[in-house]
Image (tube, rainbow, N blue to C red):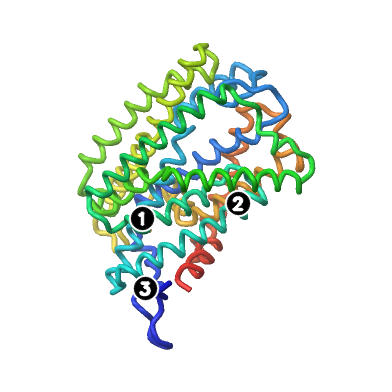
């Protein structure tokens, strides 16, 4: 594997050069920060255990309030956060490749750089799954990234073919999965009282899932969307593309409601379709989630454009003049890896049976409140780090490992 370093004392073209905070694009950080809230809300219900579950793996003994919140969460969050995450990972890879190339890196060096980063994401994700959370997504993005590293500089037609194949693969496999699982049993890994037994079960399931995603080229289509966002400048210069961003956001959110509402109503148990219809609703909900993830990214790009229009003369591209709520969200976005892992470090011990076991004693509305509180705590930490001029510790570690 080619190295990204030059001779001693003379760094090579891919030497790590961190982008100054004032020069960072605001839109991706806003999207990443809000994405972490969506991820916390989506993940927290997977910790619920010990009670019979219905559609969407929600407890059947839920209250009327729980059913309403489950419906809203299903419509706007479930299967929407991970596509948003994948799109932003793809955008990040393309941006990384562009900056390395601008510093003089060869095509081979860029691929080596992205491959190292993907391998370390697999390592981070595997440890995360073994220690805390069976639904880790970092390793999945890492294994998809190994392929994406060889696609990031390819032409539009090649990317379109890969995206189409990936979309077909995901749709087919997920539909078959939904058909076979029906409502499915609760995740008994979270109900295990012995931590080592639970860790072994988590790791086994995680490795199988990661291998499946890699072999079937899952999520490549979402990475390609991220590549397109980087190439077109929609996130780097959103103020120049507000019409396009608005059209994408409106179309995506319209598709979300039109295609995702039947499944959301099923999860809330307001309607009771037969198994075949429920499978169709679930598939349409998932497919619309890929569009919705893009729509959310565009919404936060529009917010960034609005902020930048209000502060056109700022020397820091409006970063220092950002309104306080957006400052908090973007601080989380700048430290998304650290905040993502902290969420599991808080929620897993509280919810799992090997810890405090709250997952068997609270409803979904209480679980959502706990997740929102956890995200808020990570935001407080992220803001404190930002004020101290420090990056997240896991961002620093990943950067050092990637650039060696």
Label pair 3/2, CB-CB below 8 angstroms = no
The image's mark for residue 239 is: none
The image's mark for residue 342 is: 2
Mark 3–mark 1 Cα distance, whole angstroms, equals 32 Å
**Residue 51 place in picture, x, y as percent:** 71, 24
Residue of label 3: 14
**Residue 272 place in picture, x, y as percent:** 52, 11
**Residue 378 place in picture, x, y as percent:** 57, 50
Q: Nearer the viewer, mark 2 or mark 1?
A: 2
Label pair 2/1, CB-CB below 8 angstroms = no
**Residue 296 place in picture, x, y as percent:** 37, 38
**Nearer to us in this view, 253 or 119:** 119
Sooner in the amino-acid sequence: mark 3 or mark 1 = 3
The answer to whether residue 309 of the structure is visible from this angle is: no
**Residue 63 picture quarter:** top right
Task: Provide the secondary structure element on which disc 3 rests.
Answer: loop
Q: Is residue 344 left or right of residue 68?
A: right
Q: Quadrant of the N terminus?
A: bottom left
The image's mark for residue 321 is: 1
Q: Residue furthest right?
A: 194
Label pair 3/1, CB-CB below 8 angstroms = no
């Amino acid at each position: 594997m080619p190295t990204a370093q030059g001779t001693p004392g003379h760094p090579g073209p891919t030497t790590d050069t961190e982008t100054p905070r004032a020069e960072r694009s605001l839109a991706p950080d806003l999207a990443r920060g809000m994405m972490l809230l969506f991820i916390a809300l989506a993940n927290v219900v997977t910790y619920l255990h010990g009670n019979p579950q219905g559609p969407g793996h929600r407890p059947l003994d839920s209250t009327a309030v729980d059913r309403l919140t489950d419906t809203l969460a299903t419509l706007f969050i479930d299967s929407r956060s991970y596509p948003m995450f994948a799109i932003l990972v793809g955008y990040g890879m393309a941006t990384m490749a562009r900056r390395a190339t601008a510093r003089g890196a060869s095509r081979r060096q860029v691929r080596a750089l992205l491959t190292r980063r993907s391998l370390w994401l697999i390592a981070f994700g595997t440890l995360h799954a073994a220690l805390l959370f069976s639904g880790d997504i970092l390793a999945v993005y890492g294994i998809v990234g190994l392929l994406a590293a060889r696609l990031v500089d390819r032409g539009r037609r090649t990317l379109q073919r890969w995206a189409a194949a990936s979309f077909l693969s995901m749709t087919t496999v997920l539909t078959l999965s939904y058909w076979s699982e029906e409502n499915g049993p609760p995740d008994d890994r979270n109900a295990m009282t012995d931590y080592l037994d639970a860790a072994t079960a988590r790791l086994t399931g995680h490795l199988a899932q990661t291998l499946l995603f890699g072999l079937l080229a899952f999520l490549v289509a979402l990475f390609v969307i991220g590549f397109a966002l980087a190439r077109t400048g929609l996130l780097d210069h959103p103020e120049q593309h507000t019409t396009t961003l608005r059209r994408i956001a409106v179309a995506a959110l319209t598709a979300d409601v039109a295609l995702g509402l039947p499944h959301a109503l099923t999860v809330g148990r307001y309607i009771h379709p037969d198994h075949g219809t429920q499978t169709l609703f679930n598939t349409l909900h998932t497919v619309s989630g890929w569009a919705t993830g893009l729509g959310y990214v565009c919404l936060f790009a529009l917010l960034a454009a609005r902020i930048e229009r209000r502060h056109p003369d700022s020397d820091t591209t409006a970063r220092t003049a950002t309104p306080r709520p957006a400052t908090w969200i973007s601080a989380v976005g700048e430290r998304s890896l650290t905040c993502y892992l902290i969420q599991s470090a808080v929620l897993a011990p509280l919810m799992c049976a090997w810890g405090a076991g709250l997952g068997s004693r609270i409803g979904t509305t209480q679980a959502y409140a706990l997740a929102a509180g956890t995200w808020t705590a990570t935001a407080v930490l992220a803001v404190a780090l930002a004020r101290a001029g420090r990056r997240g510790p896991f961002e620093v570690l990943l950067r050092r490992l990637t650039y060696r």
